[in-house]
Amino acid sequence: METLMIEPSKSTPKIHFDPSTGKLLISGHAYPENAFKFFEPILQWLDLFLAENSAQFTVDFELRLPYMNTSSTKCFMILLEKLDDAYRGGMQVTVRWYYNPDNERELECAEEFKEDLQLPFELIPVEES
Amino acid sequence: MERVTKQAPPLPAEQPARLPALAEMPDRSVTKVTLFGGAVIVFAILLVGWLVYTVTQREAVDKLKTKDLLHLADSIAAKVDGQIRKAKETSLLMAEDPNVINWVAGGERDEALGAVVGRKLTLLTSEHGYDNSFLVSAVSNRYWGEGGTVLRTMSRSDPEDAWFYANVDNRKPIEIVLDYAIARGDTFVFVNALIGGAERALGETGVGLSLKQSAEQFQQFKYGDKSHLWLVDREGTIYLSDRYEQAGTKLNTILPGAVSDELFAGFANTQVVTYRTAQTGTIDLISRPIESADLDIVFAIPRSESVPFLHKIRTNTLLAVLASLLLIVAFYFYVSRKLADPYKRALRHNEELELKVAERTRELSLKHEQLTDGIAYAKRIQDSVLHSEDVLREAFPVYFAIRQPRDLVGGDFYWAKRVSGGTLAAVADCTGHGVPGAFMTLLAQSLLNRIAEHECQDDPARLLALLNRHLKRTLRQETRQGDTDDGLDIGLLFIGDSHVLYAGARCPLLVVRGGEAEWIEGDRKSVGYRRTPLEYEYANVQLELTDDLVLFMSTDGWYDQNGGANDYSFGRTRFAAIVAGQAASGLENCRTELLQQLREHAGSKEQRDDITVLALQPKRKQVQVGEATR
């Protein structure tokens, strides 16, 4: 499997999924006009990745998302649900969301996601400008 | 209002603009560059040529003065010196010869000695190259000549013989004497040696050289026709010259006064003097003393003879410079032309591209205008459908409503409907914004109206549940999987006479009472989406209706607006704080303050999402005008 690298743009985040280490990173703003179009390849990649890797693999999901629009939120939920399913299937999955404590909405958004998931979901404040 | 079908105006038949004649266009700058470059090259070549010539000339002259002339003078001096030394030696040998001494001392009586001496005298001229030889006895006063015979008898009273007696009296061992006999067309130099030396002073003997021949010999030393050679004494009297007739004259009659003064001032040393006159040009003079006599060689060479090749160098350098210039300038122009051509072509190409770009831009802006026109019309439709002002105004004396779509049309709306027993009011955030969002708003509003009219009027929770079902059916989103997944977040209020009911789907209610603000969250399941079960039941929250009760509902566009120094979101907390703070000053001020702070926060950032806010103070009696925007 190849590494998935998507450069950030004004309205889309940076994606860096490394299959060899299991480190998945999403960082930046997510408010594309057509969220499905943006997230489709990412979801496909994730499907493939989760199918190919056995339960022994540790997936480390790092998130830094100060803002996402509604449609992105939906797509993101789908993404997280896939990971949740994998976790319930026995895979080691950890989600770590780095948020800025001054950015209220970010924390709220993260917490909302967390509510619906079973997998380990850490909310880590980061003091950064 | 009639439908106006807008047609795009026909494109005018246009030719692309004619490009200006290329002949003048770029040539000016290219010519300037060419000329300047050419000037630089010309200057460089001239400079090099001049430098080469000047340096060469200077070095040549320097060499001439410091080496060539010296060597020349040395070699001439050596020759002359040699000749004089030889003559001196010969004379001295004669003078010291015991045969000569004895014979003279004996009054020339001894015949055997006489024969010897006579033979010597003869040999001096016949074999050794002297012009004459002599012997004058101070004892007998007889003058013996080269023939070995007596030529005359000397006499003290004869002024012509004075030289003899002077030498003898002075006891000068050796002397060089010039004898000018211009009438004869010849001059002689005599070397006189004292017979027997200074102790005996028996007479004089020696040899003589014809100047004429020496002068002719001198010729071989000359550099060229115009160079001159002199042998002078310390007073400047010319003993010998390449022009024989100058013998006996003074050098300062031939050379300019200042020059000969300078020469005489330093006669004891070798010196080089350069002078220039109008007739002669530049002349280099070298004078060198001759050790064997108190004489100096003076050699004068015109510069034109000593470094004649300089003229050649100058001419050739000039020719080379001119040739190079012509070649380079020609080459340069040729190359420039070759460069200018592609340059011109590039410019033309650029012009053509710009025309193309202008054309495309025109086409695009036409298309864009069409699109915008379409959406502007759509906006009119949305605005009229979503119009709820009358209901609000009638139902609530004190309220405000803000509707600020991000684009022309948007996905947010507020809604109000008079029902029996009270009024329904809602704020909703449909999926997306812009055109897709607008579609949803029309659908949602239509459903709300239908449900409120036919199915449920005073139970917000049930109303939302019905809305959920209807929407899912309409959008065919009853199952978990499917192509679309759209819906809305909504906060719905039923305001009766004495109580308020609230039900929300991810749209919290902000309650302000007694100066305090409190959030009521509502349900977490949005309306219409697949993840929300078809039969989902929402919950009502009941609130007591008091005079000071103020209710706020907002879509998340406000809270999400980014801005400030760190580009963070506005946040619910800040919103609530403002509202609480403004509780005493009235709803109008509250609205102003909220908008002000939002504007400040956003600063130069764009509006991120649709914004809709509804604020109600149901029990207030005083009329305050609320406004909807846009």
Image (cartoon, coloured by chain):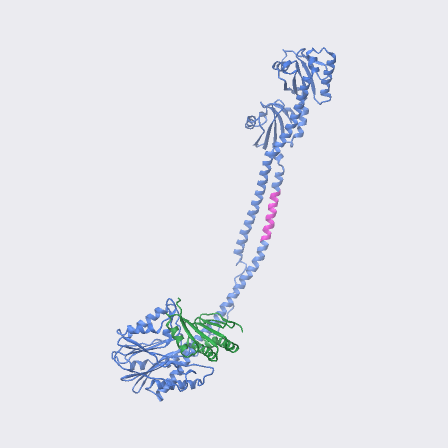
In the displayed structure, would residue B326 be above or below residue B490?
Answer: above
Q: Residue at x 27, y 84 (%)?
A: B498
Is residue B507 rendered magenta in the image? Answer: no
Residue B3 x, y percent position in the rendering: 41, 80
Q: Which residues are magenta?
A: B316-332
**The C terminus of chain B sits in image quarter:** bottom left
Q: Nearer the viewer, residue B151 or B510?
A: B510
Label the blue chain with its letter. B
How many numbered tags mark residues here? Answer: 0
Residue B597 x, y percent position in the rendering: 33, 70
Would residue A123 be found to the left or right of residue B63 on screen?
left
Q: Is residue B2 visible?
A: no
Using the rendered view, name the quadrant where residue B314 is placed: top right
Task: Give the residue furthest to the front.
Answer: A56
Using the rendered view, name the quadrant where residue B137 is placed: top right
In the displayed structure, would residue A72 be above or below residue B94?
Answer: below
Label the green chain with its letter. A
Q: Is residue B62 visible?
A: yes
Would residue B25 be found to the left or right of residue B105 on screen?
left
Residue B32 x, y percent position in the rendering: 52, 53
Using the rendered view, name the quadrant where residue B97 is placed: top right
Residue B177 x, y percent position in the rendering: 63, 19
Q: Nearer the viewer, residue B372 or B454?
A: B454
**The N terminus of chain B sits in image quarter:** bottom left
Q: Main secondary structure of the magenta part?
A: helix
Is residue B325 rendered magenta in the image? Answer: yes
